[in-house]
Image: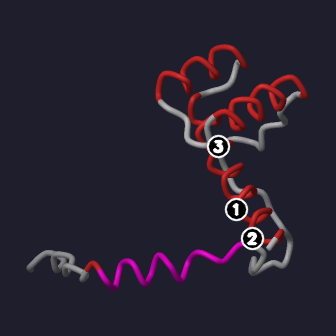
């Protein structure tokens, strides 16, 4: 008796479509509840951390690797948190400057 058939390969596009169908857009959860994403919880920055981040942002909107390391060590945050904060702050700056027009 022959064994089970080997799995047939699925095209990459079909896999992407299947994965995308499994994800819902932010604010459009199937349950309707705004459940938190798994992973790291949202960082609550202290006033001192925010002041230093804002000061650094005023000096330079894009942060270099050495400055990112320095800020991460000084503020007891990860380099990833620093990078994400700068990305978000640039978007906030962009919205503010567009709204001002």
Residue 12 percent across, percent down from the top left: 27, 78
Give SS at disc 3. helix
Residue 50 percent across, percent down from the top left: 82, 32
Q: Nearer the viewer, residue 93 or 7?
A: 93
User: Which residue of the protein is positioned furthest toward the right in this rendering?
Assistant: 47
Horizontally, is 21 left or right of 30 in the view? left
**What residue is shown at x 57% (from left), y 36% (from top)?**
80
The residue under label 3 is: 86
Mark in the foreground, 3 or 2: 2
The residue under label 2 is: 98
Cβ atoms under marks 1 and 2 closer than 8 Å = yes
For the residue carrying disc 2, how many other residues have a C-alpha within 10 Å: few (<14), some (14-19), or many (20+)?
few
**What residue is shown at x 68% (from left), y 14% (from top)?**
74
User: Which residue of the protein is positioned furthest toward the left in this rendering?
Assistant: 2
**What residue is shown at x 59% (from left), y 75% (from top)?**
23
Cβ atoms under marks 1 and 3 closer than 8 Å = no
Q: Image quarter for residue 49?
A: top right
Mark 3 vs 2, N-terminal side: 3
Q: Image quarter for residue 84?
A: top right
Between the residue at mark 1 and the residue at mark 3, the CA separation in whole angstroms equals 12 Å
């Amino acid at each position: 008796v022959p064994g089970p058939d080997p799995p047939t390969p699925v095209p990459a596009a079909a896999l992407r479509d299947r994965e995308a169908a499994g994800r819902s857009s932010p604010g459009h959860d199937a349950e309707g509840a705004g459940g938190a994403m798994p992973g790291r919880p949202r960082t609550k920055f202290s006033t001192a951390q925010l002041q230093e981040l804002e000061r650094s942002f005023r000096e330079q909107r894009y942060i270099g690797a050495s400055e990112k390391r320095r800020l991460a060590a000084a503020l007891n945050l990860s380099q990833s948190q620093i990078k994400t904060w700068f990305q978000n702050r640039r978007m906030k700056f962009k919205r503010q400057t567009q709204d001002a027009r």
